[in-house]
Amino acid sequence: MDETQFIKKYTDSLNKLELLVFFSDNPSTMDTADSISIWSGIPVKQIQEILDIWIDQGLVKKEGVIYYFQPDDHELLSLSKQVVQTYKSTRILFRQELDQISTTLEKEKRDHQTALSKEIGKTDTLLQNITEAVAFIDNTKTIIKCNRVFLDLFPQSQERSPLSFDDIFHNVALKEAFSELIRKGGGTYQGPIGDRYFEVTVTSIKDENGETIIDDYNEVIGYFWVFRDVSDRKKIEKIKDDLSRMITHDLRSPMTGIFTAFEMILKSGERNLPENLYKSCQLGKRTSQFLLGLVNDLMDVQRIEDGVIPIQRQVISLNQIIAESLEHLESLIKDRQISVIRSITSELMNVLGDHDKLIRVFVNLITNALKFTPKKGNVSLSLKRCDKKPAINQTLHLADNPYALVTIDDNGYGIPEDQLPHIFDKYYRAQQSGRSIVAGTGLGLYFCKLIINAHHGEIWAESELNKGSTFFFVLPLCKEI
Ligand code: ADP
């Protein structure tokens, strides 16, 4: 028999090897199974089983309840000694290997912890370097983390810890506005805080897939608040507003006069005018028409903002409004050589709304799609019914009612990602880099937003630079009459 055969037959488990080592280290042991178990550290049940097997195999003898190690012959004794030796040296190597593995694991754990604290440090540094006031507020309204700008903005928050939302916002109107944002699951608030004007954006805390993180009680775990000081922008807007109010008021009548004069000259003298004079009059008519359009746009926006133009409400069909809007745009569509693909539901999409203003919304959006798409491009227009809040935009703050969903899609220049959130702002015009400047006022989309919101709808856009833009709006459908 060789060593391997001995191991297979007599010591085919770790406990048997350990017991063999025990007997080899303590050759004069004569004891009960219980005591041997205590001395060797092997559970008594296993000791009993091994000893019984070894008695049958002639490695161990038993007198009464006393066991002792005494192999039947010399070969068994020397083989057991060899196996013990081999096992002991392997055990040392094995222990060394194990020690090395646990040292490596320890080191990895330490490295990981250092990297983690560095990451936390980085996030903190990032937070402290943001120029806006930023805070994370959990669902119990406790402020988990905020930056220095936030503490400077709300100095009272420096005195308390933990900080609660209610400790900071004492102003009842502000508190109510912010609570409403939380109830809605996020949104934007614009208004004064102290003597400055702020744009406050509240978004739920999301995971790396952009999904809102929910706790075990099915509640949003918290919100990310950003307070952007827009006082300077507001001041400029106010100056622009005052100026444009003054200009529009003084310009409208003379502009109408100039436009009508050119129109009359062109009508009466069409055949008699020399060609260059005729062309100049046409240019004069076009320019004054553009300026008059601009003045009218400005006045309309001002009157809507002031609540002076009420929204007429009557049952109108969006299918009809689209047909009329496209009629208005016939010559522009031809001129731009753009095919307008229509996908209009045959179902009547009736809304309670203002016929003329909704036509202007469609005309503005389709005109933009035509303006910002190279000649011979494609524009698609679709109208369909949604039985509840459309799934394509989960941030919409709408009830789950039936809606008409309008989509105006183009394959034009697109809008840079950083400018997309601003295109519905008053006077905002995105920079279409590398493109020749397209005429406009930056009022069209602002007007559309005012009108759609006044109809209890929502408007938004998606865009990819050099691929195209898609404008969406939803309007609540009329209940069947
Ligand atoms: P404008 O009078 O400049 O057209 P709007 O308010 O209608 O003003 O639009 C604001 C800005 O949004 C535009 O100047 C343009 O940069 C961008 N925009 C609007 N519609 C589109 C579109 N379909 N494709 C690309 N950019 C668009």
Image: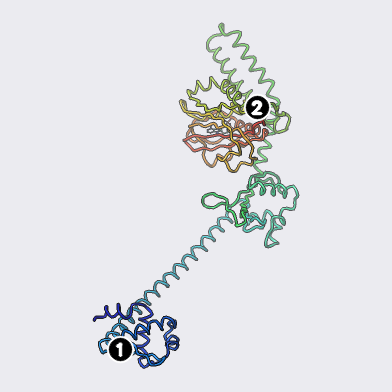
Q: Residue 225, position in %: x, y?
A: 63, 51
Query: Which three-letter amino acid code belongs to the residue tagged 1?
Result: Pro
Question: CB atoms at circles 2 and 1 under 8 Å apart?
Answer: no
Q: Is residue 194 visible?
A: no
The secondary structure type at the circle numbered 2 is helix
Task: Name the residue: 67% across, 28% down.
Answer: 353
Residue 211 vs 115, above or below: the answer is: above
Location of residue 85 by image quarter: bottom left
Q: Please tell me in which quarter of the rendered image ligand 1 is found.
A: top right
Mark in front: 2 vs 1: 1
Q: Dot 1 corresponds to which residue? A: 71
Which secondary structure lies at badge 1? loop
Disc 1 within 8 angstroms of ligand 1 (CB): no
The outermost residue toward the right is 172
Compared with residue 142, is residue 316 higher up or lower down, i.e. above or below?
above
Query: Residue 357 bears which disc, if any?
Result: 2
Q: Residue 49 versus residue 156: which sits nearer the camera?
A: 49
How was this image coloured? rainbow
Query: Is residue 90 positioned above or below 461 on the image?
Result: below
